[in-house]
Amino acid sequence: MYKAVRARLRALVCGMRGARRDAGMVTSEYAMGIVAAVGFAVLLYQVVTSDAVSTQLQDIVRRALSGAM
């Protein structure tokens, strides 16, 4: 029984070591994630600051502030 318990513990420890090896991102993955986030932020900024969206947002805020309570 002792050998069976020891073999099971060894299998669990080896499995944890294998999972730990692939648990995080490498530097290149971080860099690609940052580039994608910056690209999305630039796109979102341009959409929000466009004339059509800016006018609609101002209209929504004006209607919300002028509403009767």
Image (cartoon, rainbow, N blue to C red):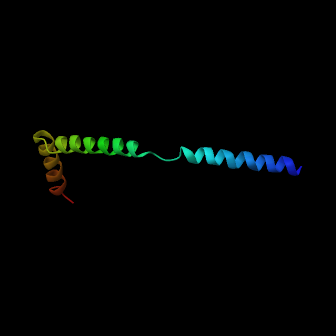
x, y percent for residue 26 = 44, 45
Total label count?
Answer: 0
Whether residue 25 sits left or right of residue 22 in the image: it is left
Look at 18% across and 57% down and name the residue there. Answer: 68
Look at 13% across and 49% down and name the residue there. Answer: 58
Q: Nearer the viewer, residue 61 or 40?
A: 40
Look at 38% across and 46% down and name the residue there. Answer: 30
**Residue extending furthest bottom?**
69
Q: Nearer the viewer, residue 45 or 62?
A: 45
Q: Quadrant of the C terminus?
A: bottom left
Look at 34% across and 44% down and name the residue there. Answer: 31
Whether residue 51 sits left or right of residue 10 in the image: it is left
x, y percent for residue 33 = 35, 43
Whether residue 21 sits left or right of residue 41 in the image: it is right
Q: Nearer the viewer, residue 30 or 68?
A: 30
Whether residue 36 sits left or right of residue 61 in the image: it is right
